[in-house]
Amino acid sequence: MKILSILYDGGDAARAEPALLGTTENKLGLESWLQELGHEFVVSSSKEGPDSVFQKHIVDADVLITTPFHPGYLTADLIKKAKNLKLAVTAGVGSDHIDLNAANEHKITVAEVSGSNVVSVAEHVVMTILTLVRNYDTGHQQAITGNWQVSNIARKAFDLENKVVGTIGAGRIGYRVLQRLKAFDCKELLYYDYNPLSKDLEDAVGCKRITDLKEFLGKCDVVTVNCPLHEQTRGLLNSETIGYMKKGAWLVNTARGAICDREAVREAVSSGVLSGYGGDTWDHQPAPQDHSWRYMVHPLGGGNCMVPHYSGTTLDAQARYAKGVRQILENFFENKPQDPANVIVEGGKYATKAYGQR
Ligand code: NAI
C-alpha cells in the first residue's frame, strides 16, 4: 500500500531529539515498521499547491496521515482525485482539515487518536488564561527590556479567583480545563455544549450548563473554546457574538483558529473591547507572516497570548499520538475494527456526536 504522511519539518531540533516524533525527520517512528511490511511510505512537509508532494501523491495513496499542527488540507476536490484513499488518520485530535462530508461521500474512514493530547491542551488553556488575566506578558516585556513600571502592569492585572469562566465545548479537553480550574475558586464554572455532561461529572467540578449562547457569553469573564471546527462552529465568535461578551472579558481559543473570526478578534483586542485573546490555533497554518493575530495589542499593552500551534504536541503527547497512529494502522492492515472513540466518520456517516448536531 502507499501511505502518505504530511508532517512538519523539525530541522536540527528533530535530528537532535528523536522524541520529536511528529516531524518529517522522525516520521512518527513508523518508517522501518512500514517498510518491513512492504508498504511505500512517503513523508513530506510540502502541502500547498498542485506541485506539492501532498497533492501529487494523494492521487494514488491508500492512507493519508497528517497532523493538525501542519495539516495537509484534504479538500473535497482533492478527495475526488484521491481514487485509492480508504483511510485518513489524524496524528493528534481534530480532523477539520479534512472535508468530512466529502470523506463520507467517498466512504473514506477518518480516524484520530482521541485523548492523546487532551491533558496537554487543558494545561495550556489554564496557562493562557492565567497569563492573560494576570497581564503576565506586559510584566515580562518590562523585565527583559530593562524597564520597571509596576502601575502599567497592575492596572490590567487581576486574580482568577471569583471570576466566571466558561467553556464552549465540555468534551475531553473542556472538561479537563474545568477540573483544573476548580482549584482557583472561580465564582462560577459554566459550559455551553449541546451534549450535556452527566450530573455526576457536573457535580464533581461544580459546573453548570447554559444552553443559550448569548446568555452564556454575557455571564463569562473568561471564555475558553474547546469544541471542534465544523459547519456550526466556523466563525462562531464573530463581531456580533463577541458583542454579547462582557466588556473587558478574555477569550482563549486553543480549539481551532477559524472558530473565531480573524478581523473581529483583532478589532476587539485593539479597541479594548476584549482585554485579551490567546491560543495556539490559527485559521491557516503555518500562519502567514502578516497575520493580524501576531501583532494585535490592547490599548493598555499586552492582551496577546498567541503562540504557534504546539499545545497538543508536547513530547509526552507526541509519544501518545505516534503510538495511537500505529495502532490505527495495525487495525486497518489486519481488517480489525477501530476503537470507536477514535472514529470520526466511517462508512459514509459521522461516527462521533462531537462534529455538530445532525
Ligand atoms: P471532544 O470530542 O472530546 O469534545 C468536543 C466537545 O465539543 C463535545 O462535547 C461536543 O459536543 C462539543 N461541541 C461540538 N460542537 C459544539 C457547538 N457548536 N457548541 C458547543 N459545543 C460543541 O474533543 P476534545 O478532545 O475535547 O477536543 C476538542 C477540540 O480541540 C478538537 O476537535 C480540536 O479541534 C481541538 N484540539 C486542539 C489541540 C491543540 O493542540 N491546540 C489538540 C487537541 C485538540
Image: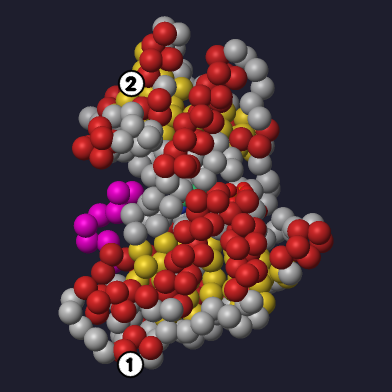
Q: State the residue position of label 1.
A: 151
**Callout 1: helix, strand or loop?**
helix
Image marks 1 and 2: residues in contact by CB distance under 8 Å: no
Of mark 1 and mark 2, the one earlier in the sequence is 2
Image x and y of residue 104, in percent: 58, 32
Image x and y of residue 155, in percent: 38, 91
Distance between the alpha carbons at the discs numbered 1 and 2 = 55 Å
**Callout 2: helix, strand or loop?**
strand
Q: Residues within 10 Å of mark 1 (few under 14, many from 20)?
A: few
Which picture quadrant has residue 207? bottom right
Secondary structure mostly seen in the magenta stretch: loop
Res. 147 in view: yes
Write the residue at 60% across / 73% down.
184
Identified by mark 2, the residue type is: Val
Which residue is nearer to you in this view: 11 or 265?
Answer: 11
Using the image, determine if residue 294 lies above or below residue 214: above
Write the residue at 55% across / 51% down.
119
Tag of residue 129: none
| Image-based side of 262 in relation to 241, left or right | left
Res. 233 in view: no
The answer as to whether callout 2 falls within 8 Å of ligand 1 is: no
Magenta residues?
283-292
Write the residue at 31% across / 79% down.
139
Tag of residue 42: 2
Q: In the image, is residue 287 part of the stretch drawn in magenta?
A: yes
Q: Residues within 10 Å of mark 2 (few under 14, many from 20)?
A: some
Image x and y of residue 94, in percent: 51, 45
Identified by mark 1, the residue type is: Ser
| Image-based side of 350 in relation to 41, left or right | right
Image x and y of residue 47, in percent: 30, 35
Which picture quadrant has residue 333? top right
